[in-house]
Image: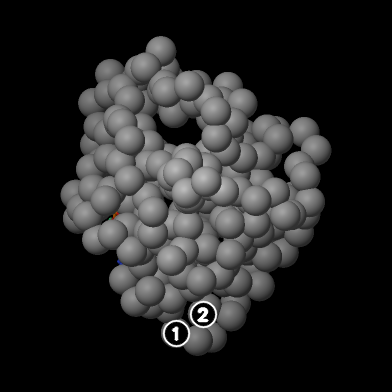
Amino acid sequence: MSLFDSARFRLSVSRLDGLPPADVPEIAFAGRSNAGKSTTINVLTRQGRLAFASKTPGRTQLINFFDLSEKNAIGHRERVASLVDLPGYGFAKAAEGTRKTWSELIGGYLAERDTLTGIVVVMDSRRPFMPTDEWVIDFLNTRPVRLHLLLNKCDQLNNQQKKETLLKVKARAAEMGPHVTVQLFSGLKRIGVDELRETLERWIRREDTPVVP
Ligand SMILES: Nc1nc2c(ncn2[C@@H]2O[C@H](COP(=O)(O)OP(=O)(O)OP(=O)(O)O)[C@@H](O)[C@H]2O)c(=O)[nH]1
Ligand SMILES: [Mg+2]
């Protein structure tokens, strides 16, 4: 069994003062609304309805925490990491008040959470680096966290487009530094699931190079 199969919903948070204690490494999923963050968590954990996924952008409105656990030496289940599903950014239709709450909540979480180990930035591979992605990636790049740029919905690209997109985004990632990695992914067709699992497990086990802030 993979570590990710152990995922269980822990809690939803609507305010920064409601965050659970920062104790285990956390991996957050950030990205524009509708990019496929919740679907990615469902595919990663092999649990179809763990995170709410929907055709309607703006489905996820709270910060949702999922626990990953494994048995310790004496056979007790122990929490070892959390996956964190974030509300999407760049959702134009949201009322201004709602947008403000979102940026305060998500911005505050991303800026201040000490146990935040890495962030999977989920982008639509047909249009990576939209202006809001650029802004969020620039902001995240100032934090001591790993970044994995997940080019989702690659089932919508032909082979040539996949190759070109991957090359282009890898070149950008190389400029940012060795803490930034890139892959093609499709939650729908389950393409790239093992690669994602391997990357995130290295983060959790701290088997990759540490990030210098
Ligand atoms: N073609 C295709 N569609 C996908 C893929 N992954 C997700 N989708 C679709 O994209 C839509 C949005 O998926 P979600 O997982 O809810 O997106 P989200 O990023 O969590 O959205 P918010 O919670 O609104 O921020 C749904 O209709 C999914 O079925 C994929 O790999 N390929
Ligand atoms: Mg969602």
Left or right: residue 104 versus residue 56 is right
**Type of amino acid under label 1:** Asn
Left or right: residue 73 versus residue 152 is right
**Type of amino acid under label 2:** Gln
Q: Which residue is drawn at 51% across and 80% down?
A: 161
The residue at which mark 1 appears reads as: 158
The quadrant holding residue 201 is bottom right
> In this view of the protein, can residue 76 be seen by the observer?
yes
Depth check: give the residue in front, 174 or 132. Answer: 174
User: Which quadrant of the render holds ligand 1?
Assistant: bottom left
Q: Classify 166 as above or below 84.
A: below
Q: Which image quarter holds the C terminus?
A: top right
Depth check: give the residue in front, 119 or 104. Answer: 119
Q: For mark 1, does the 10 Å Cα neighbourhood hold few (<14), some (14 to 19), or many (20 or more) residues? A: few
Q: Residue at x 66, y 40 (%)?
A: 145
Give the residue at the far bottom of this rendering.
159
Give the residue at the far front of this rendering.
74
Q: Classify 6 as above or below 170.
A: above
Left or right: residue 206 versus residue 190 is right
The residue at which mark 2 appears reads as: 161
Residue 103 pos. (x, y %):
42, 25
Q: Which image quarter holds the N terminus?
A: bottom left
Residue 144 pos. (x, y %):
70, 35
Q: Which residue is drawn at 66% across and 46% down?
A: 146
Give the residue at the far top of this rendering.
17
Q: Distance between the residues labelled 1 and 2?
A: 5 Å
Q: Does the residue labelled 1 lie within 8 Å of ligand 1?
A: no
> In this view of the protein, can residue 27 be seen by the observer?
no
Q: For mark 2, does the 10 Å Cα neighbourhood hold few (<14), some (14 to 19), or many (20 or more) residues? A: some
**Secondary element type, mark 2:** helix
Q: Are marks 1 and 2 in contact (CB under 8 Å)?
A: yes
